[in-house]
Amino acid sequence: MSRSYNTSGSPRWATSLRSRIAPLRQLQPRSQLPLHTPSPKNRRTFFSSHQSPYQQRQNQYNRFQGSARRPIVYRLVQNAKPHHFVAIGVGISGLYLYNTEIVEMTGRRRFNCVSRHQELKMGDESYREVLIAERGKVLPHNHHLTRMVDGVLQRLVPQAPIEGADWKVHVIKDDEMLNAFVLPGGKVFVYTGILPICKDEDGLAAVLGHEIAHVVAHHPAERMSTSFITLGAVFAISFLFDVSGQFSSFLLNLMYSLPNSRTQEAEADKIGLMMMSKACFNPEAAVKLWARMYEQEKEAPPQFMSTHPSSYNRMEAIQGWLDKAEAIYDENGCSSIKDYMPGFQTAYNSHVSYLR
């Protein structure tokens, strides 16, 4: 059987089949049609034409990932040589030693980079903040409680060598707050809630003597200086060991800040005890004060988690300093002076009874 061919050399049945399939191609969906190739004039010239958009974005990211977006601190540490770290260590050590001083009344060495002027400025700012926060609760200066606290303060002030102090008493009516504090510059705040715990003028002198001792020893400036060390150490630990800043902050607080704070509190207890003894307040009242505070403590945290020593430990420590404090008390002839001030003690007891 003979086959017929068209002029192109293809069988006639193939030509007929192509003619039938051609109309069906026109019915194919657009997604299956070949993509339109842009003309050369419309092509982008920033990237090579054979790269996909994903590859282009990836190349662009890799180009800037290396250095431009990396913080300068990382690049400096990466490029640093061993002698650079030695120089930094020597500089930090020199700065620390330069700002190391001795607490006059105890002989303790401590780091303090805050000047007296800066400390007084901080005290003035805190003074304004406290007055705003306690607005409406500060008793007037002619109130009998304010005059009573001021009478105890005036006997302690001569024993407190604070340069540029402007002593002023503020009694805050808050029977639930067992607190008192003295700001740099001599601004005294006493909450009425602590007066029944003081019980008498000697107990109040123990509280005020402790708070005044913080200012005498410049503990506020020391705490500010310590915070600089803590912040720098938190940053260094987080950077070098790639750990959370919260973890390093907790660790430094537990191992450095809290023990340092407890040291300051114990130091203020000792300085305050000697001050009240020189001012002819009975030093035994300080032991009794912390015994009453110990009875008032409820759900107190463990000492290693607190900024203050426990009341029991403070009572025990003060008991060990009593011999020296009583010697100071006797040297100043306080036993005979005390007999001439019975009226003040009676007035104090009546004021405290008024709060109960």
Image (spheres, grey):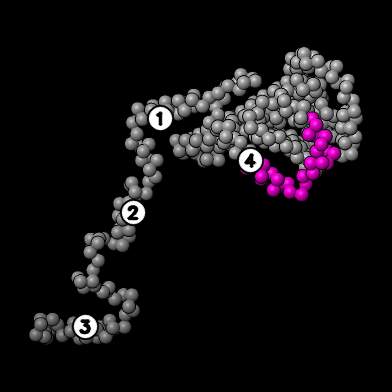
Under mark 2, the amino acid is Tyr
**Mark carried by residue 18:** 3
Left or right: residue 213 compared with residue 119: right
**Amino acid at dot 1:** Ile
Q: Per the image, is 203 magenta?
A: no
Q: Nearer the viewer, residue 220 or 197?
A: 220
Q: Residue at x 77, y 44 (%)?
A: 138
Circle 2: is it few (<14), some (14-19), or many (20+) Cα within 10 Å? few
Q: Residues within 10 Å of mark 1 (few under 14, many from 20)?
A: few
Q: Which of marks 1 and 2 is in front?
A: 1
Between 44 and 228, the residue placed more toward the observer is 228
Q: How far apart are marks 3 and 1 (CA)?
A: 84 Å
On the image, the x and y values in percent for residue 290 come to: 78, 27
Residue that carries the numbered disc 4 in the rendered image: 124
Which residue in the structure is indicated by mark 1?
88
Q: In which quarter of the image is the N terminus?
A: bottom left
Q: Residue 245, position in %: x, y?
A: 52, 40
Secondary structure category for the residue under label 2: helix
| Mark 2 or 4: the one toward you | 4
Q: Is residue 292 visible?
A: no
**Contact between labelled residues 4 and 2, with CB atoms less than 8 Å apart:** no
Query: First in sequence: mark 4 or mark 1?
Result: 1
